[in-house]
Image (spheres, rainbow, N blue to C red):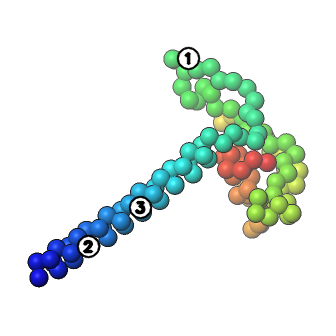
Amino acid sequence: MAYLLYTVAFIQNAAFCIVHVSNVFKVSGAAYGIAKLINTPNMVLMNGTITRDSTATDDDYAGSVKLEDVQFAYPTKSESKVLKGVNIEVEKNQVVAIVGQSGCGKSSVVSLIERFYDP
């Protein structure tokens, strides 16, 4: 009887450890994917340089946003373009609203500005 109880306790603890070992491997795989994403170079190069001094604030470096003749299609649907020749210029401290019908590309413009996608 003691041997049977010992065996059951051993198997339960081994199963508990195996569940956690698989979680460790899942986290390891996710961390590798994140590191690979962070180290992937951007397809669009940024122009200009910023040299910060100790007296400057973030507002001193805020600038304008300009999109010129932007063509864009989502990677999963590369045959249908969402944006065709979009031109937008927003100056520093200017407030802009992007309005339009559903599916006209408002979210796509914001995603491009935030660099979720490259045009």
Judged by depth in the image, the label closer to the viewer, 3 or 2, is: 2
Which residue reaches farthest left?
2
- Please say if 70 is above or below 10: above
Judged by depth in the image, the label closer to the viewer, 1 or 2, is: 2
- Please say if 50 is above or below 29: above
Q: Secondary structure at mark 2?
A: helix
- Neighbour tally class for label 2: few under 14, some 14-19, many 20 plus, Cα within 10 Å: few
- The amino acid type found where label 3 is placed reads Asn
- Asked which quadrant contains residue 59, the reply is top right
- The amino acid type found where label 2 is placed reads Gln
Q: Is residue 97 visible?
A: no
The numbered disc on residue 53 is 1
> Left or right: where does residue 49 sit relative to residue 35?
right
Task: Look at mark 3 in the image and give the residue it sits on.
Answer: 23
Task: Name the N-terminal-most of marks 1 and 2.
Answer: 2
The numbered disc on residue 12 is 2
